[in-house]
Amino acid sequence: MNHADRLYLDHNASTPLTAAARRAMFEILAPGGNASSTHAEGRAMRKHVEAARAELAAHAGVAPKQVVFTSGATEAAALALSPVMRKASGELRCSRLFVSAMEHPCVLAGGRFAPEAVATIPVTPDGVVDLGALEDLLDAHDSEAGPALVAIMLANNETGVIQPVREASEIVRRHGALLMVDAVQGLGRLDIAPAELGADFVIVSAHKIGGPQGAGALVLGDAALAPVPMFRGGGQENFHRAGTENVAAIAGFGAAVAGLAQSGGRWDGISRIRDFIEAGIDTISRDTGMAAPVVFGSRVERLANTTCFAQPGILAETALISLDLAGIAVSSGSACSSGKVKASHVLEAMGVSQAIAGSALRISLGSDSTSENAGRFLTAWKDIVGRIARRVDAA
Ligand code: PLP
């Protein structure tokens, strides 16, 4: 099957590069020049970096100096999750890190905190961070030892469940703690402005919005509060992150952010396509005599493009391979760790049984996904479920 015949339904893992991002990158790859050099070539490179910075800053409602470009959200998380912060008035030492149990592995890993200083905030069966538990954890925290840092994502990459970040921020503020928000899956779909979220730090990634892989950013809620750098050396990125900037990737990121204004409107119809898929899988299960599918997070607010469901009796691995053979790319569990199939820590945190979690598939639509795409998926799904149901009947 050639590439054009394939149907890609794994946009939460990575999105195709937009034409504008590709153009912006190509333009920069050939001429060369270091963005820190003062000659014309260097200045031209600097212009590209600063244009991208201005674009992301405007999108996030911050000043350009509050945007720190990194190699991706993983690096931005490692940078933000620092026990030592630089403040205008000196140093601030955070004694503890609380991360929600459904965070992406790059946040769950705890950044630069010692493992014993990291604790998890539980998640409800609907996949929402448990705010009561957050309150209890912060109540019990000894703030004399230093404030706590809390990390809660804006929307979960596996279930699409949108988190009550604003409410979490109010709890965090009441306790004098700091908040980092992983907005990777929210960028382009939800408001990621630190002021709106009540966040001190927001992290984003280019390749979830049609930008290149290997570019991301830490957005500071306040220019006067920043984590101590991980990379020291040159003064790049306003002394927050030393190292020659990856100008082509940053420019591609900037072009993708600029393109969000156009793709934004298209998300409106996407939830209808997602709902059509969910209704379709339900009908297929009924028609074939299989147990009803379980849709995770369906009772709470989710990203319009994401559905994560399990069809009891069909292993995710089997379904994934069968769909791949039919030319359709979806994911099981978290795609960042895909390739090895293990039960998702997100579903585990929601209290989903191993048996059901082992059947979990995620479909994540793109802003250009169509109802024809959904129809093609459902035709392939009907075929797979029907085949397995007949095998079960014959046994
Ligand atoms: N956070 C979330 C929610 C993600 O989905 C991902 C990537 O899948 C990341 C962080 C890591 O981003 P990056 O690939 O830029 O390191």
Image: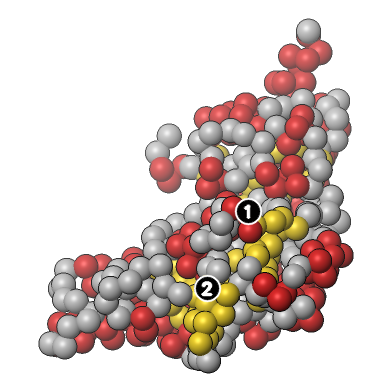
Task: Name the N-terminal-most of marks 2 and 1.
Answer: 2
Q: Residue lying farthest top? A: 395
At 68% from the left and 44% from the top, the residue drawn is 345
Residue 49 lies, with reference to residue 314, above or below; the image says: below
At 83% from the left and 54% from the top, the residue drawn is 124
At 59% from the left and 53% from the top, the residue drawn is 115
Question: Toward the viewer: 137 or 372?
Answer: 137
Amino acid at pointer 2: Val
Please state the horizontal and vertical placement of residue 299, each as a whole percent of the image: 86, 56
Question: Toward the viewer: 179 or 194?
Answer: 179
Compared across the picture, whether 245 is left or right of 180 comes to left
Marks 2 and 1 sit apart, C-alpha to C-alpha, by 16 Å
Please state the horizontal and vertical placement of residue 230, each as a whole percent of the image: 40, 67
User: Are circles 2 and 1 on residues that touch, CB within 8 Å?
Assistant: no
Please state the horizontal and vertical placement of residue 328, each as a whole percent of the image: 55, 40
Residue under pointer 2: 84
Residue 184 lies, with reference to residue 378, above or below; the image says: below
Q: Residue lying farthest front? A: 144
Residue at mark 1: C-beta within 8 A of ligand 1 = no
Give the quadrant of residue 389: top right
Q: Residues within 10 Å of mark 1 (few under 14, many from 20)?
A: few
Quadrant of image for the N terminus: top left
Residue under pointer 1: 116
Please state the horizontal and vertical placement of residue 133, each as a whole percent of the image: 83, 61
Question: Toward the viewer: 259 or 62?
Answer: 62
Give the quadrant of residue 99: bottom right
Compared across the picture, whether 339 is left or right of 390 comes to left
